């Protein structure tokens, strides 16, 4: 989460984000009434485990939601030197 972000959609926002942590709860439901019958143990051979990203990010300016990786990759492709990092050149 300490990586720099840049919104892949609006391309300008580097500072305002909503972090969405994905909490996975494997369950088994009763198909007749929809009640949760049990929480499924991880490693249950009859249930495919979730393999999606654990963190999604929403741009706080345009509202797009993407995997955190997209925001990091976009920032890396469009890295701009910080103002206080380089001496002014003519
Ligand atoms: Zn955006």
Image (cartoon, grey):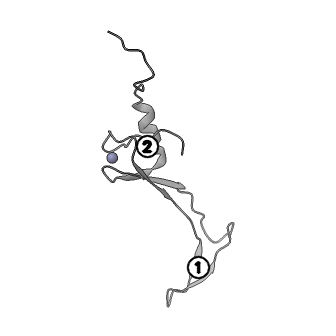
> Horizontally, is 1 left or right of 83 in the view?
right
Q: How many marks do you count on the picture?
A: 2
Residue 42: quadrant of the picture: bottom right
Query: What SS does tag 2 mark?
Result: helix
- For label 1, the crowd category at 10 Å Cα-Cα, with few meaning under 14, some 14 to 19 and many 20 or more, is some
**Marker disc for residue 53:** none
Residue at x-position 41% and y-position 38%: 74
Residue at x-position 42% and y-position 27%: 82
Q: Position of residue 19 (x, y in %)?
A: 47, 54
Q: Position of residue 1 (x, y in %)?
A: 54, 46
> Horizontally, is 11 left or right of 5 in the view?
left
Residue 18: quadrant of the picture: bottom left
Query: Is residue 1 or residue 34 the one in the foreground?
Result: 1
Residue at x-position 52% and y-position 40%: 3
Q: Position of residue 73 (x, y in %)?
A: 45, 38
> Horizontally, is 70 left or right of 62 in the view?
right
**Marker disc for residue 71:** 2
Quick one: quadrant of the C terminus?
Answer: top left
Q: Is the residue 81 above or below the residue 10 in the image?
A: above
Query: Is residue 33 or residue 63 the one in the foreground?
Result: 63
Residue 13: quadrant of the picture: top left
Which one is in front in this view, the residue at disc 2 or the one at disc 1?
Answer: 2
Q: Is the residue 58 above or below the residue 45 in the image?
A: above
Q: Which residue has dot 1 on it?
A: 28
Q: Is the residue 8 above or below the residue 44 in the image?
A: above
């Amino acid at each position: 989460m300490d990586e720099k972000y840049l919104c892949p959609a609006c391309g300008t926002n580097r500072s305002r984000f909503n972090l969405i942590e994905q909490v996975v709860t494997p369950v088994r439901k009763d198909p007749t009434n929809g009640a949760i019958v049990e929480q499924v143990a991880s490693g249950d051979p009859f249930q495919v485990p979730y393999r999606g990203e654990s963190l999604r990010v929403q741009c706080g300016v345009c509202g797009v939601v993407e995997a955190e990786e997209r925001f990091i990759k976009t920032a890396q492709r469009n890295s701009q030197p910080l103002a206080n990092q380089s001496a002014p050149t003519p």
